[in-house]
Amino acid sequence: MKPSLFLVPFLLFVLITIQSISSATTDDFIYDIAGKKVKKNSPYYIGPVNWGNGGGIKSSNTKCPVHVIQDPKEVTKGDSFEFTPNAPKEQFLRISYPLGVSIDLTKSNGKCKESTFLKIDDIESKPPSNYITSGGLFDTAISCFQFVKYPKPTNAKVPSYLLQLCPSFCGAGPNGCFNISTSVYNGVKYLGASGTPLELVFKKASA
């Protein structure tokens, strides 16, 4: 028995729909520079896609709370970071999923006893009050980050991302998301909510 004229296009529609859903599910993962999915609660270096403009992201190694800065030396990897999605069942990071970002403070001269989660106390303030520091709390407005694909990547073959703070996603706070950028203050390139949006890539660090 031959399939009806209606059945053939219907089957094609179902097949295309399934492929589209599968593609969308795969494409929203976040990948490191080796092309592997970024795992939650695993150490990664964060660096600029263009290392000619500076090195990796690290702590300021000052008194607590520490600030998050970009190392001026191009050859440095910076400190390692870990990411904790607000969705407990997720094993890998996804685009536009709220998460907490924590930094390894074991190398800090301040030997901080506080929380290693990052925060911005006043996202709508001016520098230096809108810079990223340690001492945040997971799943709170001031520590509610997300990664999105960088709008105009420098290299289409390298997965690059933009970090944002989205306070209203995790509690009371300003609506919308704020791009994390670099801003120079007293010769130091700080990460915060003003300046030039930073295009970021991930590199797996040894545990």
Image (cartoon, rainbow, N blue to C red):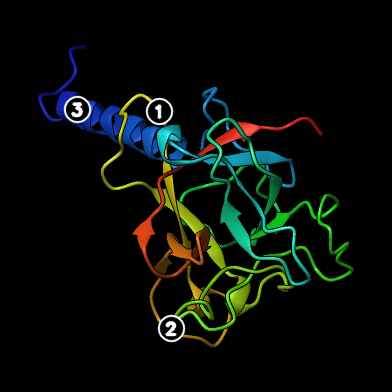
- Camera-near label (2 vs 3) is 2
Compared with 36, 48 (above or below) is: below
Q: Amino acid at mark 2?
A: Glu
| Residue 10 placement, left or right of 17 | left
Q: Who comes first in sequence, dot 1 or dot 2? A: 2
Q: Secondary structure at mark 3?
A: helix
Residue at label 3? Answer: 7
Residue at label 2? Answer: 124
Q: Amino acid at mark 1?
A: Val
| Residue 107 placement, left or right of 190 | right
Q: Residue at x 47, y 77 (%)?
A: 127
Q: CA distance from mark 2 to mark 3?
A: 56 Å
- Camera-near label (3 vs 1) is 1
Q: Residue 26: x, y in percent? A: 46, 34
Q: Amino acid at mark 3?
A: Leu
Q: Secondary structure at mark 2?
A: loop
Q: Residues within 10 Å of mark 2 (few under 14, many from 20)?
A: few
| Residue 169 placement, left or right of 13 | right
Q: Residue 188: x, y in percent? A: 53, 59
Q: Residues within 10 Å of mark 3 (few under 14, many from 20)?
A: few
Q: Who comes first in sequence, dot 2 or dot 3? A: 3
Residue nearer the viewer, 76 or 34 = 76
Q: Residue at x 26, y 43 (%)?
A: 152
Q: Residue at x 74, y 41 (%)?
A: 42
Q: Residue furthest left?
A: 5
Q: Who comes first in sequence, dot 3 or dot 1? A: 3
Q: Residues within 10 Å of mark 1 (few under 14, many from 20)?
A: some
Residue at label 1? Answer: 158
Locate the C terminus and report the quarter of the image it occupies.
Answer: top right
